[in-house]
Amino acid sequence: MSIIEERAANPAAGDDDRPIGYGRIQRKEDPRFVRGKGHYVDDIVLPGMLHGAILRSPVAHARIVSIDTSAALAHPGVVAVITGQDLLGLKLAWAPTLSADVQAVLATDKVRFQGQEVAFVVAEDRYAARDALELIEVDYDVLRPVIDVRKALDPDAPVIRDDIEGRTDNHIFDWEAGDAAETDAVFASADVVVSQEMVYPRVHPAPMETCGAVADYEPIEGALTLYETSQAPHAHRTLFAIVSGIPEHKIRVVSPDIGGGFGNKVGIHPGYILAVVGSIVTGRPAGEVDGGPVREPDVHLVRPRLHHAG
Amino acid sequence: MQISMTVNGKDITEEAEPRVLLVHFIRDVLRLTGSHRGCDTSNCGTCVVLMDGQSVKSCTVLAAMADGHSITTVEGLASGATLDPVQQGFMEEHGLQCGFCTPGMMLTARALLDNNPHPDEGEIREAISGQMCRCTGYATIVRSVQWAAQHPATQEETAGEEVTA
């Protein structure tokens, strides 16, 4: 319920037809939030809940030779250690993205950016999970990275997305809009043409609440309840059904209070899927709260031109 | 190890590993989830609590270091049903949207006003300079603290109220 407080009488408006915005409306969330009674994903505790932690790649481009999880598994409190090879067996290693591509949930053959998810530890508490990350031994065969998007199409540039069949370069998408011939004609007749390279820096929305998820898979009913920092719970439910094979009507996605999003919480981060995998594998609720992935900078090459009408 | 402290006026004693951070102790052991965790690296300030009346980032304090001290979290700001003027100010001046940074911001404001009841805008901005908010752009947070400075609680409102953790 909103509390409406009148600032001043408005003689033009009757009691029943006050225009929207007239008066002052208290936000319905504020009384909870100022008392510390928000309900964010990291506040959720379920009976028997386990905690997850993600091992991330320290290098931008490398082939994974081997991963030794035995010491991590032996660490007190650790319940499971999951790698990309385990996910391949479960057919959960790759997930579709909102831009019609695929992304690795955990790296299988190689890592393709610094910070990529490599292994997932599930443990009784968050400290044990973090401890175990340091006990995982990954043997990386480090490859040449592509760290400048302007050099990504050089003939000798290493191919990053060789997971896509037939890919021989780093040309990853085409985009076209408008009428090219007409546009060229306008530029050809312009009095002044200015060419400029504009660098669009790396942009990643950074809300104060990091991304996270708590997954609760109930094996007898085959039903999944997923609490996550999501700005798009309905789209996520559909994608989780596609990835996991769990029918959509048996998936319930709960977005509690969100500590800011700014678009960052529209997509599905691998950690969300890992929380689900952790719950399926262990038979217990599993949570993961961590930062989102690191993105390479984008560079946009544009040619703004001035058309002098005189 | 055994850790004892006063939290929101209540004496508590709990078991925790020596390495446990105060923010995890408050959130996971005491289950006071109003103090948030946004970075773990002392950058964001969503975990700010008061330790003996001074604002500290609870992700950068070990629970063991708070042994014997008095901690105030956002849950201890109000006196029963009566909000602290800082809480009222944040509601009056739209000092919050998503609410994630709000507890830390309000506790820093409380500590500021306790030491300096009439801060100017520069002093308010300096006080909250170690904390981040992505929603408001800070202007309304400054106005919220100014509102609280202009509406101090009277003794009758705060005296004798039971404070619960």
Image (spheres, coloured by chain):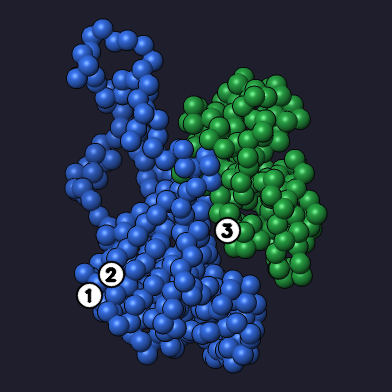
Chain colours: A blue, B green
Asked if labels 2 and 1 touch by Cβ distance under 8 angstroms, the answer is yes
Q: Please provide percent x and percent y for residue A190.
A: 29, 35
Considering the numbered disc 2 on the image, is that residue within a helix, a strand or a loop? strand
Q: Quick check: B117 left or right of A23?
A: right
Mark 3 nearby-residue class (10 Å; few <14, some 14–19, many ≥20): some
Q: Residue furthest top?
A: A11
Residue A236 quadrant: bottom left
Task: Name the foreground residue: A187 vs A87.
Answer: A87
- Badge number at residue B31: 3
| Amino acid tagged 1 | Pro
| B94 versus A67 height, above or below | above
Considering the numbered disc 3 on the image, is that residue within a helix, a strand or a loop? loop
| Amino acid tagged 2 | Ile
| Amino acid tagged 3 | Arg
Task: Name the foreground residue: A184 vs A259.
Answer: A259
Q: CA distance from mark 2 to mark 3?
A: 28 Å
Chain letter of the residue beneath label 3 in the structure image? B
Chain letter of the residue beneath label 2 in the structure image? A
- Badge number at residue A251: 2
Residue B39 quadrant: bottom right
Task: Name the foreground residue: B157 vs A229.
Answer: B157
Label 2 and label 3 in one chain: no
- Badge number at residue A247: 1
Task: Name the foreground residue: B12 vs B138.
Answer: B12
